[in-house]
Image: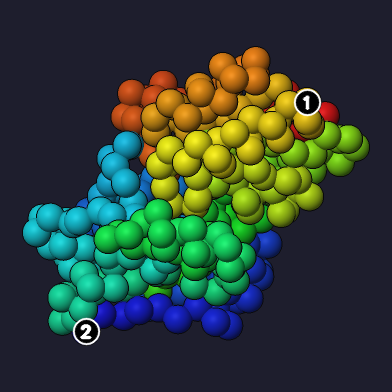
Amino acid sequence: MINRLKLTGILSAAALILVGCGTSGSDESAVSEDGIQVVTTFYPMYDFAKNVVGDNGEVSVLLDAGQESHGYEPTPQDIAAIADADVFVYNSDEMETWVPSVLESIESSDVIVVEAAEDIALFELEEDEAAEEEHDEEGEDAHSVDPHIWLDPVYAQEQVAAILAGVITADEENKESYEANAAAFNEKLAELDSAYQTAFETAENRTFVVQHAAFGYIARRYELTEVAVSDVSSDAEPNPAKLAELQQFMIDNQITTVYYSDSASSKTAQTLAEATGASLEVLSPLEGITDEDQEAGKDYLSVMQENLTALKKVIQ
């Protein structure tokens, strides 16, 4: 039967582990000789899990760069891979809305399931935002919360702790190695958080305009204001009235940059830029990194640094 790891209480223990207070387990590992097998849904979960697992096994990802996480339909091969894994990691039911039905279909599997955002209070959308979501996503999965939790470096550390707890449950034998890996990665995430705090702490202009509303957690963490063209789960083109309103907002507030996602069309952002004389910049929601970019050395940390550099052009 599926072991859906409940992390309440475990996370506090994992936090102690991450500062070096853990001890080695003595239970025999149930994983194969090839090491622990971890299946993840999309890139941030893959990168977090890979940093925890290290050389102790294999981490795979289901979604390629450019695939839509919200409306993804897993193949029979994907479902089999999840069922056969030692650990399955996903962000949340609100992001990967297809996961609950998959887990129901493999109820007999003994895979350990980690919902990395399970113990994090996701930000609830305002009533008008939620209503717009429902309208724009007719026939699809709309959101009442913002699922882009991984873009907050502080919450990312909590997700790493959740993944650590799940991996140790599956492979107690390599507990100390997982603890050390997670501690090292979370130290880098803490440094990333510090870099964002330092960059924005004295900024006078704290408003940025984006095509896709994926950066609310960054805005809330660092006391910024995100003004978005489309909602949290859609890059749909806004109606003419909203577009005109955004154009006037940019002119009135002397906003000279529009950000667009590297994984979606920049058409609406280009329209705004042309109408206001603004420049275009990429702000990545990090839902996927191509194999070529990964081979070139790009990862969660480096892209988040690129996002910081891009935001500093406006937040100053």
Report the quarter where the N terminus lies: bottom left
Could you classify mark 2 by the number of other residues whose Cα lies within 10 Å: few (under 14), some (14-19), or many (20 or more)? few
Instruction: List x then y, in percent, for residue 77.
Output: 10, 55
Q: Give the amino acid at mark 1.
A: Gln
Instruction: For the residues labelled 1 and 2, say whether their Cβ atoms are less than 8 Å apart.
Output: no
Q: CA distance from mark 1 to mark 2?
A: 57 Å
Q: Residue at 55% of width from left, 40% of height from top? A: 241
Front residue of 13 and 215: 215
- Above/below status of 42 relative to 244: below
Residue marked by disc 1: 254
* Residue found farthest to the left: 76
* Residue found farthest to the front: 241
Residue marked by disc 2: 1
Q: Secondary structure at mark 2?
A: loop
Quadrant location of residue 173?
bottom left
Inspect this view and state whether residue 286 appears: no
Q: Residue at 16% of width from left, 75% of height from top? A: 106
Front residue of 280 and 55: 280
Instruction: List x then y, in percent, for residue 103.
Output: 24, 74
Q: Residue at 34% of width from left, 71% of height from top? A: 113
Could you classify mark 1 by the number of other residues whose Cα lies within 10 Å: few (under 14), some (14-19), or many (20 or more)? few
- Above/below status of 101 relative to 177: below
